[in-house]
Image: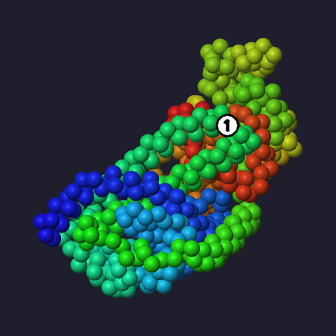
Amino acid sequence: MSPSLTSAYTGMAEGLAAQTWADLRAHWRPVLGFHLLIQALGAAIFAPALSWVTRRMVLASGDVVVSNYDIAGFVLSLPGVIFVLAFAALTIGLLLAEFTGHGWIAGHAIVGRSISAASTIAFVLRRLPRLMILSVRLFLGLLLLAVPFLAAAALYWLMVLMGHDINYYLAERPPEWRRAELTAIGLVVLYALLVAWWLARRLYAIPILTYEDARPAEALAQSTVVTRGRILAIGRPLILWWLLLTVITVAITWICRLASDAGLDWAGVDVHRVLPLVAVYIATLLVGGFVYGAVGFAGHQFLVTRMFCVQQDGSRWCPPAAFGVDHHRSGGLVRPAVFVTLALGVVALGAVWFLLSQLDLKTDVAITAHRGASIAAPENSMPAFSAAVQAGATFAELDVQRTRDGQIVVVHDADLLRMAGDPRKVVELTAAEIAGIDIGSRFAPTFAGEPPPLLGEVIDLVRGRMGLNIELKYNVPDAELAAAVVTLLRRENFLDRAVITSLDYEALKQVKRLEPRLRTGHIVTAAVGDIVRTEADFISMNAARVTARLLRRAHDAGKEVHVWTVNAPEAMLRMIELGVDNIITDDPAQLAQVIRARDALTAPETLGLRLRVLFAEPPRELTDPGAMDPL
């Protein structure tokens, strides 16, 4: 480069951002109009395809949640590979069309001429055949660059991971799989750096194709020559542009997040409040994304075009294609393009709505009243179990231990100090003595004189109306507790309406030996090893420790997942949407109301409700295991 050009280039670089911003402000109407058409076209093409893929994965998984497992399984399949390649090729084509249009506008800005979105669209349509060829060349080039990296990944797979099915690695994540993930990350980073350098050498292909009427192969070759030795000088302004734009966007997003948190805190889980708020937030997100894309892509290409101009000796540069174009006749090409885009958009919206309406987003989740409806009455009391029945609970969870005379009493603690102010231990008292202890007064005067019930009394109360989740409570060693409970359930003919749970795994195995027909649940607070491999029929867990991956693994193993103790409506809704089988709560009436309200929604409304998680922080009881009441 000559000294004069070097000086011009340096001077241009110093004022590049200011010039670009001035150009954008002067030509914001055609920039936004053209960007809108490209986005509409992209949505019309991609929305039905993405909806179909999502529906395919949901139906294949059998759950309302599409997990990483489902996504990985689809991407690694032949249809998934074809879809990803087609998606990538179309994305490159749309990006090239966008950059070409903004480059055309930028050329007019540099020479101080006005331009319309209509003539920009017409120009891009005239260049469309060459853009398609350029898109194919770039796509094939990117694939060719990927070949050695894909070969390295395949070789690693054959040498290290070939011994087992992919589903084993996705589910179990053994050490060799984690090493494979690190290797894959390294390969992706190296590929990304190579691609960034390779694309930087071809940055000027768009202005060359636009303003010098070159063919795609010529534009790529000439760009490679012109950018030689200038990658850092060209790349620095572009990196700073995107960095500055992203920082501003993040700051605005943070402020909007504060507003969305406040709004959703006010709305709670009231769908009449949540759905309008979510609609507003999604609209804001779409508008913000649109503006970010328009300013980002246009600013990027304005920078590239101006740098190309200066490098071509900007003091005399005048884009030839900016002249000799009949702007008035451009509408002849634009109107059909706009009509086709709108028609595709209508078809896309119809396809998305149809697919959404066909999805079954309803879930069957059982309600377990924790120690009865313990928010409405003293825990583990007859009024609490009556309230659970009235609330429509599927089960009531209760705690049993034996008295001194061998009766099975419903009490959680080893003593009655917390419930009744009586420090005596349950194991030291007879059933008759316990029947004289008041556990209701401390809850409310209306429950004064309420004693702890016997298990048989609770069975008589709930028979035919609700099941029981009976937790074996080993506050003191009791080798006969499990056998005594099984015997009572047999005598009461209540085996089919009871499940047995415990922290004591050996006790659950004892129950199974005594009565194989009884379903058992392993209560897990903290565990070493794989809890999914328990011999129990289901797992009972702190809701804050349940993940989509653990839930999938449990279901694949044929086990249900019950979560406790979920009292906040937002937490209830999130657990339902996660796909748990049973929610244990102090407030079964509230949970039943949440389920009814959710089931009354249409599939699109249900999906809209689920989208609130994009804007709301999860409740504390789903992030802090210590915030949950223990079973």
Kindly indicate the quadrant of the structure image that contains residue 229.
bottom left
Q: Name the residue under label 1.
A: 268
What quarter of the picture does the N terminus occupy?
bottom left
Q: Is 93 situated above or below 575? A: below
Which residue is drawn at the image coordinates 20% and 62% (left, top)?
A: 8
* SS type, badge 1: loop
* Residue 84 seen in the current view: no
User: Which is nearer the eye, 338 or 472?
Assistant: 338
Which residue is drawn at the image coordinates 81% and 27% (left, top)?
A: 383
Q: Position of residue 354 (x, y in %)?
A: 74, 67
Q: Which amino acid does label 1 sit on?
A: Gly
Kindly indicate the quadrant of the structure image that contains residue 186.
bottom left
User: Which is nearer the eye, 614 or 630?
Assistant: 614
* Residue 62 seen in the current view: yes
- Model colouring: rainbow
Q: Position of residue 609 (x, y in %)?
A: 68, 49
Give the class, few, some or many, for how many residues have Cα within 10 Å of label 1's Cα (few <14, many ≥20): few
Q: Is residue 428 left or right of residue 390?
A: left
Which residue is drawn at the image coordinates 39% and 47% (left, top)?
A: 247
Which residue in the rendered view is the most extreme toward the left? 3
Q: Is residue 505 left or right of residue 208?
A: right
User: Which is nearer the eye, 511 or 418?
Assistant: 418
Which residue is drawn at the image coordinates 38% and 82% (left, top)?
A: 213
